[in-house]
Amino acid sequence: FYRTRTRTRTQIKPDSVNSVISASAAHLLRLHQRFQFLDKDSRGSLRSEDLEAALSENPIGVRIVGAFFQQETVDFPSFVRILAHFRPTEKNRTRDGVQPDPAVGRKCPSSVAFQLYDQDRDGKISRTELLQVLREMLGLQVTEEQLQSIAERAIQEADLDRDDAICFDEFRKSLEKVNIDHKLSVRFLE
Amino acid sequence: MAEQWRSALLLCLLMAASSLASTGTTAPASTGNDTEHGTGTINTLPIVTWKWHHVEVPYLESHHEHGGGHNATGIAIVSFKWHHVESPYLVAVWILVCFFGKLLIEANHKITNYIPESALLICFGFILGGIVWGADKVQTFKLTPTVFFFYLLPPIMLDTGYSMPNKLFFTNLGAILIHAVIGTVWNAATLGLSLWGCHQGGAMGNIEIGLLQYLLYGSLMAAVDPVAVIAVFEQVHVNEVLFILVFGESLLNDGVTVVLFNVFDAFVSLGGGAIDAKEIIKGIVSFFVVAFGGSLLGFVFGLLMSLLSRCTKNVQIIEPGFIFVLGYLSYLTAEMLSLSSILSVVFCGICCQKYMNSNMNENSIQTVRYAMKVFANGSETMIFVFLGISAIDKAIWVWNTGFILLTLLFILIYRFIGVFILTWMLNRYRLVPISFVDQIIMGYGGLRGAVAYGLAVNLNESKIKEKNLMVCTTLLVVYFTVILQGVTMKPLVQWLKVKRAEIAEITLIEKVQNKVFDHMLIAIEDISGQIGDNYMRNKWRNFEEKWMSRLLLKPSARKQQDHLYNVFHQLNLQDAMEYVKEGERRGSLEFIRNESAFVDFKKKLGEDYEEAMPDIMADMPSNDPVSTCRRDVLPTVSLEMHEQNMRGLREAEGINAHHLLDQHLYKGRKQHRYRYSRSHLDINQDENEVQEIFQRTMRSRLESFKSGKMGVAPPKTITKHTKREPQTKMPNGKNKPYHSGDEDFEFSEGDSASGYDTSFPTRVTYRAGAGIENPAFMPDLDPSSPLHIPPWLADAGMEVNPVAPSERAQVRTPGYLHRLSSLRTNARSGETAQDRDLPTPPPHRDDDHL
């Protein structure tokens, strides 16, 4: 599903990005500069290593890149498009009155977050997957045993059907109280 | 623990009373100082003034208690020395009366549901004032600025700073600052100018107030009052962003108010002619100095305090005292340097909370938390009561319909206009815009309070002819906003369907997810090359971890810094507590031993409930009705309402457990163990011992309890117990210690024959390192045990067991722990009575020997 989407997208010309995400030329220019800066050997596309280099300080940087950019290389239009997922929702609507692009739709941030855990793409966060993320995020001072019990408990909290794993629905449910759209919004492209 | 902070609180209250008492005596003197200071010729506007004399008395007396000397001429056996104790006595009585007032008001929740407590307290003040007036024909008691600014306000501000939700505050700092600075200036200017305009138009009649005086008046009326805002919003539970916006504004606008007030006060003294551009620029500069200087001072004090708390390990008793004394000093120092004292003490609290909470030990943290609430809540009560009392005074009432009504009108209108304009501007840049409904509440939440009144009383009568009119109008505005707006706030919030604060339980997965989201946001900003909030926050966090934590945290505390892990720990503790309580309620802790520590207790309990008592389950949709209803009745002045209440709840649970234990623990014959010590809190050490013994017996009892049910327990235990039984029942134990199932305790049975007269603790010896073990977290002795269903529910297992019926009957009787022991007697019923030549001992005694 995602693959087909990206394929159609790569055929769009760079300037048509503008119509889709409604960003001003100045902002696009700045993003383009950033894109070129990240693109060390100026091939016109970013590899995941380029992105990971930008996130060297982030403990789960590799995961984030993996969840955001699932294809091998990223060209500028898809780069912009992916980032545009994290703009505040309301503003998209209030400004132009239309949804960004009904055909493409907005990739929901929570699914990106889910993919961050779900490395083997089986639609479930297993205990080991959660444990891996926790291990990357928590400091060294937390022992393995504690990590395991944290993972255990976290799974139990979210796991409604008792299959010892968190599926996407359960994941969304556990985050019902958190306003994901507000939380996962960054102010840019304005 | 309960004992400990109770005594600490008592101590602190005494301190407060004595320091208040000293104000009583010194108040006239220092108010005299004030006026002197005011009348002193001011030629130019000072940016920073040195006001040592202004603060000298409380500054010194926060250290020195004043001692009264007395000279005896003859021997009087009893003498009546009222004058000797008069002022402290009066202060104490007033405090008591105010507290009783609160008690009275809080006793009836039907009323407080509709009318906020602050309004009721003011009304209570009216009544008290009426009584005093009726008795004395003159109002002898009222809220003097000295008492208010030096003694009542600082504790509240310290508390708000200390319990400030930092992240929320700093996330919204921009909006808060805009409202606090620009909003307050707007309010002051428009109110002053409009009133002046109306005056020119002839709406006021014949009063002598010039433009500058109007502006001065406007500036003292401009500030939203933190005390009133907390008191009202506390009970409304609006969403946290809205709350922090109104509340943060009310805190931070103090800097602006102080500056505006001082500037216009100076301008009034200078007279209109002497004001030139230089003075105005000085005024603007002084704003920055006062506001930022105050904050910086608070920050420095906060750092000092954190540093200090690194090394207070050996004086744990007074450890919590440091924060109060240093916080107060930061307030007074700011006052002395004529900086914003409120900002100073608030930032002091904000800055030190994290480090203090990790450096101090758990007991001190609780002490600080509770003492803060006691002081803050007490001060708040007294402020409102005295605001009410102050009204009953014929001297201040000067009626001027135009002035008063116009003030009320303008305050309301301009507040709304200011809020709408400012939020409109802010919403263009905010990620999550402030909704229109929220704006209305923000506007409506512009309550004025005691700060305005204190400033109004501080006005100099010789320069401002109509001081009394201003004081009286201020009082009316305070009553209008606190009582009328306070009462209507709740219906308004409901009617407008303002988003409420969610009382949600923290779940671990949510916390994990929040962390992940944070990382994602930072990643997005990193990739897009944006320097946004998240980027800055990340930088700050790194800096903080790298430098501040290293400097300010104990090495041991630094290790436990992980937020996620702390949440996990807290959740586990809470669960364990609930679980044990449930076990005690049902009469056996047996089932605890058969679970690993990481079971989802709540779910588990829920299921048990369903099986055991479906009718209880019916009214348990919210998982714990007890806690929710208790959450409602717990009166606190807290910012993080939810967290505070959760803590309170947990505390309450702890106390309950203590009570339960106290009631059922074995008491020794001699109760010599209470000795007094000022510096150590180990008076209850023996009680710990008793607890320890209790746990031991419980465990050995459980052992045998298990063995009673042959069908369920594995053979290993059975053999162990059959071996043990004869030993236990030996009538004359020959001082033969034996090891029970758990290796870590031993009982000497030497005294068992000689009767029960020796006090209990001496009879049991145990190894030093053994300590109290939490059975919930002990590795299970027999891992093969299938007892995942609590024994009293395991009907299948029971049927095999011949003694089952009696057992079950025993266990099902609710709650009391000692029932367990009689159960034990029961199980062995026949033999015990015969084998022992003793008169049947009270059931719990019997168990000591198991």
Image (spheres, coloured by chain):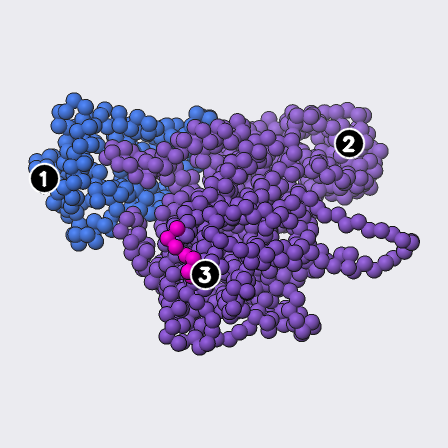
Chain colours: A blue, B purple
Chain of the residue under the numbered disc 1 shown in the image: A
The quadrant in which residue A118 appears is top left
Picture disc at residue B763:
2
Q: Residue at x 70, y 46 (%)?
A: B65
Left or right, A136 with respect to A14, comes to: right
In the figure, B12 relative to B458: above or below? above
The quadrant in which residue B200 appears is bottom left
Q: Nearer the viewer, residue B507 or A163?
A: B507
Find residue B755 and report its horizontal and vertical position in percent: 83, 36
Picture disc at residue A15:
1
Left or right, B214 with respect to A121, comes to: right
Chain of the residue under the numbered disc 3 shown in the image: B
Q: Residue at x 41, y 57 (%)?
A: B275
Give the residue type at disc 1: Asp
Residue indicated by mark 3: B271
Chain of the residue under the numbered disc 2 shown in the image: B
Q: Residue at x 21, y 44 (%)?
A: A190
Does the CB distance between marks 2 and 3 fall below 8 Å? no
Left or right, A102 with respect to B350, comes to: left
In this picture, which residue range is highlighted in magenta? Answer: B272-278
Q: Nearer the viewer, mark 1 or mark 3?
A: 3
Q: Nearer the viewer, mark 1 or mark 2?
A: 1
Which circle's residue, 2 or 3, is located before the other in the chain? Answer: 3
> Under tag 2, what secondary structure?
helix
For the C terminus of chain B, the quadrant is top right
